[in-house]
Amino acid sequence: MAKLSSINKNERRKLLVKKYAGKYAALKATANDESLEEGERLMARLKMAELPRNANPTRIRNRCELTGRPRGYYRKFRLARVMLRDLANKGMIPGVTKSSW
């Protein structure tokens, strides 16, 4: 089990990203639009830098839904490899069976 503070920190980041998503997307589109003047693009980048650091979507860490483990994460199941294997062996995940050949 991951530290509860790490899990909560990641949840706060998710909320901040959701809060600033529209503003962040608009500024990013302006900053990347090559048809605009260089000054306008620079101002958009400076405004992006003024946003909270945790408002950037890349700062969100994928974590296991059950344990909060950040590594060995399978996006399809939203679980860490350890829990995926444990639940699959118990037959708790539909359609997943232990392979044998």
Image (cartoon, grey):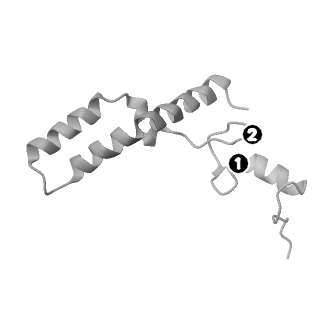
Compared across the picture, whether 59 is left or right of 35 comes to: right
Mark 1 — residue?
A: 79
Give me the residue at 81% from left, 66% from top: 95
Q: Amino acid at mark 2?
A: Leu
Q: Nearer the viewer, residue 44 or 80?
A: 44
Give me the residue at 28% from left, 36% from top: 48
Q: Which residue is most to the top?
A: 5
Compared across the picture, whether 85 is left or right of 32 comes to: right
Q: Which mark is residue 66?
A: 2
Q: Residues within 10 Å of mark 1 (few under 14, many from 20)?
A: many
Residues at circles 1 and 2 in contact by the CB criterion of under 8 Å: yes
Give me the residue at 76% from left, 47% from top: 82
Quadrant into which the C terminus falls: bottom right
Q: Which residue is most to the right?
A: 90
First of labels 1, 2 by sequence position? 2
Q: Quadrant of residue 54?
A: top left
Q: Amino acid at mark 1?
A: Leu
Q: Quadrant of residue 45?
A: top left
